[in-house]
Image (spheres, rainbow, N blue to C red):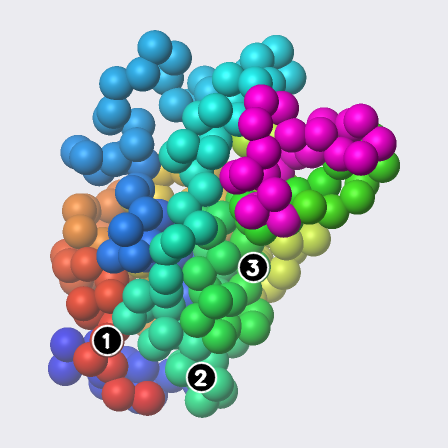
Amino acid sequence: MTELQSIIDQSRRIVFFGGAGVSTESGIPDFRSADGLYNQKYDVPPETMLSRTFFDRHTEKFFEFYRDKMLCLDAKPNAAHYKLAELEQSGRLTAVVTQNIDGLHQAAGSKNVLELHGSVHRNYCMKCHKPYTAEYILKSTGIPRCSCGGIIKPDVVLYEEQLNSDTVNKAVTAISRCDTLIIAGTSLTVYPAAGMVQYFRGKKLILINRDSTPMDSRADLVIHSPVGEVLKDIKV
């Protein structure tokens, strides 16, 4: 913690790159840990149900799973989210790059949040593009329909879909320009998102994750603990 505090004190352009482990302390399960979503037993694997093919061919079943497991609208930001917002307000954190779709960074007060995989809070009619809230999707039954009759699709990146190019470009730019990159709560196994860390050219690479990652050997500091527990004690 002393070393982490020292690095942050000396940093002027920090970028935070986070995954599902950032939100587990808010009660949202991650995907790949022992008790994660992908290790639960379903008739159809979650990876398949979260694919574009499954969405198109089995739309009603997709929404059954999506409402049950992906819409955690009662979740609140945890210590990690609030500390990152505080770092941004101090001028030291330039961007949060997140693989999460829960919107908790914004709920905690962060402004420059780059959501690589979209957000459950944005939903659009596939026919007329009218926007709808996550609450509307949660309260709907069957296949959510727009007033025009079109299917409402969450603005989340499913398997087989491409990431938003504008968001990717902004994330790569932020990572390439920062002096300190904090990677937290991610196994760094989901591509192309995980591949973005290769653009880091700064001084200090910090990894905070419960389990080891493929990048541990390259990091200047590795902390195997929950993200919120680590960041809450940082002084800004």
Q: Is residue 190 left or right of residue 39?
A: right
Between discs 2 and 3, the one toward the N terminus: 2
- The residue type indicated by label 1 comes to Lys
User: Residue 61: horizontal and vertical position, in percent?
Assistant: 51, 17
Tell me if residue 197 can be seen: no
Residue positioned 38% across, 12% down in the render: 44
Q: CA distance from mark 2 to mark 1?
A: 16 Å
Q: What residue is shown with label 1?
A: 232
Q: Secondary structure at mark 1?
A: loop
Mark 1 nearby-residue class (10 Å; few <14, some 14–19, many ≥20) = some
- From this view, report whether residue 234 is shown above or below residue 204: below
For numbered disc 3, what is the local secondary structure? Answer: strand
Q: What residue span does the magenta drawing correspond to?
A: 133-154
Quadrant containing the N terminus in the rendered view = bottom left
Location of residue 160 in the rendering, given as x and y in whole percent from the top left corner:
57, 25
Q: Give the numbered dot on residue 92.
A: 2
In the rendered image, the quadrant that contains the C terminus is bottom left
Residue 52: % across, % down: 59, 23
- Foreground: disc 2 or disc 3: 3
